[in-house]
Amino acid sequence: MGIEITINGEKKVWDTKPSETLLDALRNHGYKSVKRGCDEGHCGACTVLVDGKAIKSCVMLAGQAHKRNIVTIEGIGTIDEPHPLQKAFVHTGGVQCGYCVPGMILSAKALLDENPVPTEEEIKTALDGNLCRCTGYVKQVEAVGLASKMMRGEN
Amino acid sequence: MKNLKTFYYPETIDEVLDILRDETVKTAMVAGGTNISLSNDTTVEALVDITRAGLSYIKEEGGYIVIGATTTVRELMDSEIIKGMADGVLAHASTLIATHPLRNAITIGGNIVQLRIWSDLPTVLLALDAQVKVKGYEDRVIPAKDFFAKHPQKQLDPDEIVTEIVFPKAAEKSGAEFIKISRTKGDYAIISLGCYLEYENEKCTLARIAIGSALNYPKRARGAEAILEGNEITEDLVNSAAQKAMEEIKPISNMWGSAKYKKQLIKNLTRKAILSCNKKAIDKVGSAT
């Protein structure tokens, strides 16, 4: 089954199995930043942006992404030019093993795109679907606050 | 879903209905996908993606709030209309459902049709006296109390679709409350309770108390409601209504708790919810009345 999707700004037509999840389709096409954790909608490691909203790609079928705009971590920064969120995560020490971080940064990006000056409570709500077993979330919440400032040119 | 062959992307409700009526293909509808993506159903040959059929909206129509079936939990929690209606109980309940990326996916229609024991929205919708609008060969309007009396999937024909959820606006002098008990905020509910009270002069004229998650299908505590209606809310009356709710609702034991524990919760939460609704109603009109 062919689906048309825009991924990280590029239009693509993918041949997918109708029963395939978006997570599988993304990984099969080389988007390995999208991680498989629980595979049942709890951990958030597979979070991507679908039309700007954070979505767990393990509980969405690839067919549902037809004509949607998908963003993965490959689409928001490069090693030479990281996104402010990526810089902020490094700066605050919000990254340990790193497995949860692509999903977490995408959840944070969805938040900051809609709400550039979030409260701590709003940051926590936006990240509540991304489990991290290394940290205590403190540094990541700080990182999103810092990124918000950086994006407004305050830091 | 191993026999799934294709997807349909209808752009109107009529197109959805045409596809559902095609008896040569076994179809299922998908909106958020959180349920169907984990399904092992091998009979489904085609999925009908209904998120493009114009069913995502929240609006006020006359004395009613009208919610399109594919409106997401996230949209409910952020909607100014929903936040401003009946003390924002539906928005509040929405913030307590699952986690953010799932709230972006889960739809009100999917949530109520799939009805799981832990579902929170059905409890609120019962308390708000919602009605479920269904389209098929004939249009139907099913009151929430009937819709949730048995599993909703058993009430709908394969060629029917839930299109809207509608509930009356809250009265000026009213109070509403939603309480969910779970181990963590986004966890499945051990019990949920929705309460809505309306007043005229000093008396409670209408009471709706709905209890969910403690039993297979959410239910109104009619006996407790009857104790409140027509009376001024006093401490004694609240206690007898709470006692009655505990007696009339039969919770089940499961991994989330024993029936005995849930009975105690029903009593305590009913009391707490009535007092909260009462206070909200008084605060709204002020002590002058």
Image (spheres, coloured by chain):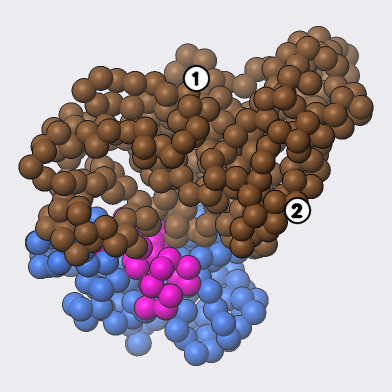
* Residue at horizontal 39 percent and vertical 53 percent from the top: B105
Residue at left offset 36%, top offset 40%: B153
Image spot of residue B117 (x, y percent): 53, 49
Q: SS of the residue at dot 2?
A: helix
Magenta segment: does it hold B122?
A: no
Q: Which residues are magenta?
A: A36-63
B270 relative to A140, above or below: above
- Picture coordinates of residue B108, whole percent (x, y): 43, 41
- Marks 2, 1: nearer the viewer: 2
Residue, far bottom: A97
Q: Which residue is mark 1?
A: B64
Residue B170 spot, x, y in % from top left: 62, 21
Structural distance between the alpha carbons of marks 2 and 1: 37 Å
Residue for point 57% across, 38% down: B218
* Total number of numbered discs in the rendering: 2
In this rendering, position of residue A33 left or right of residue A68? right
The residue shown at (19%, 32%) is B17
Q: Colour of chain A?
A: blue
What secondary structure is found at the residue carrying circle 1? strand
Q: Position of residue B277 (x, y in %)?
A: 76, 30
Amino acid type at circle 1 is Tyr
Q: Which residue is mark 2?
A: B261
